[in-house]
Structure formats: C-alpha cells, structure tokens
Amino acid sequence: MVTPATEAALAGEQAHSPEHETCLHLDADTRLDASRRLKSVRGHVEGVLRMLDDPDVYCVDVLKQVSAVQGALRKVSDNVLRAHIRDHVATAALRGDSEHIVDELMEALKYKA
C-alpha cells in the first residue's frame, strides 16, 4: 500500500532537514491510534497511582496493572515501528536512501519496547 506520504517522498516533495537527507513523517492513522492508546495508558497509570494510595493494596494486583500498562506501551511501539517499516524502510530503495534508512532502523530497534 502506498500512502500519501510515500507518494510525496517518491515524487521528491519531501522536506529537507540538516539531520536527515529526507524528512519522513509518521502517517496520520498511526499517529491518531498511538495518541488514543497513550491517552488510555495515561488513564491506566492514574488508576495504578490511585491503587497505591490504598494502604491495603495487594502487591500482585499492582504488578498486574503495571504489566497491562507495559503491554499497551508495547503495542504503541509495535504499531509505530510497523508504520516506519511499511512507509519508510520498504520504500527506501525507490528514494535512494537505503543505507541511511537501514542505519536509522538499526538505531530505532534499540528503543523497541
């Protein structure tokens, strides 16, 4: 699937920055999904904080909730990485920046949750 961002990049319409040969952006659907999920995570973290206000909170219950938050963050990370691979890595050869994108991907994988 070719997204509008990919079409623009292939047409040479992308913006330039000193840090990158081309400036590629996260697609709107992925940004919206990540934002929605992170707002949910924020609410979940606030719920865990409320649990901790209870002196009778059970340790395992806190651990379960922290694990749920980590899972939600992992899902955001997975979706953003998938979008990056789909929209930028897979089209790098067409843009002529394969080496740069591979280096960038290797760096991004260091932050994979």
Image (cartoon, grey):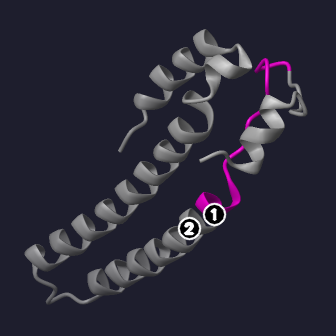
Q: Where is residue 5 drawn, in percent x and y?
A: 76, 44
- SS for callout 2: helix
In this view, the residue in front, 108 or 47, is: 108
Locate residue 113: give its quadrant: top left
Along the horizontal axis of the image, is 5 left or right of 36?
right
| Vertical order, 10 against 95 (above or below) | below
Q: Amino acid at mark 2?
A: Asp
Along the horizontal axis of the image, is 8 left or right of 71?
right
- Residue denoted by label 1: 29
Q: Amino acid at mark 1?
A: Asp
Q: Which residues are magenta?
A: 18-31
- SS for callout 1: helix
| Vertical order, 74 against 29 (above or below) | above
Tell us which disc is closer to us: 1 or 2.
Answer: 1
**Structural crowding at the residue carrying mark 2, measured as other residues with C-alpha within 10 Å and reported as few (<14), some (14–19) or many (≥20):** some
- Residue 61: within the magenta? no
In this view, the residue in front, 39 or 61, is: 39
Q: Where is residue 35 drawn, in percent x and y?
A: 59, 67
| Residue placed furthest toward the top | 99
Identify the main secondary structure in magenta: loop
Locate residue 25: give its quadrant: top right
Circles 1 and 2 in contact, beta carbons < 8 Å: yes
- Residue denoted by label 2: 33
Mark 1 and mark 2: span between their CA atoms? 6 Å
Q: Where is residue 84 drawn, in percent x and y?
A: 56, 39
| Vertical order, 35 against 48 (above or below) | above
